[in-house]
Image: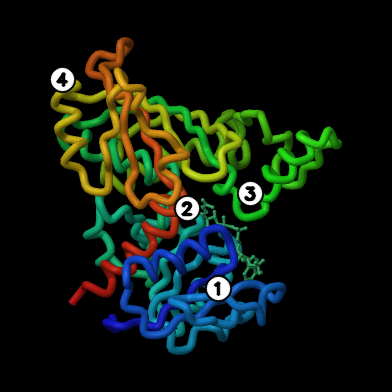
Amino acid sequence: MNKTPHVAIVGATGAVGVEMIKVLERRNFPVGELTLLASARSAGKKLKYNGREITIKELTKDSFGGIDIALFSAGGGISKEFGPAAVEAGAVVVDNSSAFRMDPDVPLVVPEVNGADVKNLRKGIIANPNCTTAITLMALYPLHQKFKVTRVFASTYQAVSGSGAQAIEELDRQVSQIVKGEEVTRDVYPHQIAFNALPHVDSFLEDGYTREEMKMENEGQRIMHHPEFKASVTCVRIPVYRAHSIAISAEFEEPVSVERALETLEAAPGLDVVDDVAKNTYPLPLIQAEQDNCAVGRVRKDCALENGLCFWVAGDQLLKGAALNAVQIAEALVAQE
Ligand SMILES: NC(=O)c1ccc[n+]([C@@H]2O[C@H](COP(=O)([O-])OP(=O)(O)OC[C@H]3O[C@@H](n4cnc5c(N)ncnc54)[C@H](OP(=O)(O)O)[C@@H]3O)[C@@H](O)[C@H]2O)c1
């Protein structure tokens, strides 16, 4: 891999894409050249990178000549259609969509958990995990290493930016309509999201779970290399702009204690322990927004499980759940010999 790669961002104008530009800047990623790609709607517009204006180009199959790393963030259909063209042109694709996550020839990577899997580049594509899964694993995986997790029961509290830029506008618009006493209009969600909670993220499967809910088990198994891991999840969209939170009850093979759990979590990379209930201190999405680290708190023995712990994790899903994780993968690619 070129040590100063030519990077392309596919979906540069989206909620994740604009964060990717900022993360590349903030982490001083050794960008040789940056190409910004989006739909024909955005072609010709400009975005700033390190103070320099870059003109957005329309994504086509010929967009990838000379590109070393292509960070895809424009939806699964675009990844399936254009990812292989990028690989054929010589780029390594880091894909944010769910298009390739369950492909056994495509590593699914959270660098703090299975960073070494970046080496298994059979298809030239590396998948970035589902956002709630990545944020959950930042706390669950260190506990798994110590106590061996068997299963989790979880509920998620997901921000609207997880549905993209249009959903942020929808929450803004609905709040303003309600304040002005106007009729509430909606385009993105099946119900009003302002001042509401929707137990519905992604499409429903025949068994009643949603696709999003099954990602924690399916992707968790691959990322932790733990094929027996089970997860029963209810995903809920809430009117928060940015950062997802997850309430988790985890059962372990080995006996657990809160003290040992906290010790383990304190030592975990990319994770802050925020846990002092006497001072009303616990992770909050409002505080985690725009933070690279995730936060864990409310750690306690689960009163209904044999070897169980309950905890609450919050993290910025546009960062650890998407842009930051993708750039960390790109950093691992550049660091490879
Ligand atoms: N939002 C999150 O928290 C999050 C977290 C993890 C993963 N992801 C995944 O990341 C991807 C992007 O999500 P997002 O939230 O950033 O969505 P978004 O805000 O709706 O942005 C979508 C991006 O895709 C581009 N795009 C759409 N149609 C295109 C086309 N035909 N050709 C080229 N570009 C096209 C858009 O360009 P225009 O502006 O020109 O339309 C825009 O840049 C999705 O696969 C999503 O599942 C998102």
Q: CA distance from mark 3 to mark 4?
A: 43 Å
Q: CA distance from mark 2 to mark 1?
A: 22 Å
Give the residue at mark 4: 255
Which numbered mark, 2 or 1, is in the foreground of this view?
2
Which numbered mark, 1 or 4, is in the foreground of this view?
4
On whether ligand 1 comes within 8 Å of the CB at mark 2, the answer is yes
Q: Quadrant of ligand 1?
A: bottom right
Question: Which of marks 4 and 1 precedes in the sequence?
Answer: 1
Q: CA distance from mark 2 to mark 3?
A: 12 Å
Q: What amino acid does circle 2 point to?
A: Leu
Question: Which of marks 1 and 2 precedes in the sequence?
Answer: 1
Q: Is residue 257 above or below residue 93?
A: above
Foreground: 174 or 211? Answer: 174
Q: Give the residue displayed 40% in from the left and 25% down from the top.
A: 153
Give the residue at mark 2: 318
Question: Which of marks 2 and 4 precedes in the sequence?
Answer: 4
Q: How would you rate the neighbour count of disc 3 (Cα within 10 Å): few for under 14, some for 14-19, many for 20 or more?
A: many
Question: Which of marks 3 and 2 precedes in the sequence?
Answer: 3
Q: Give the residue displayed 63% in from the left and 49% down from the top.
A: 168
On whether ligand 1 comes within 8 Å of the CB at mark 1, the answer is yes
Mark 2 lies on a secondary structure that is loop
Residue 82, numbered circle:
1
Q: How is the image coloured?
A: rainbow
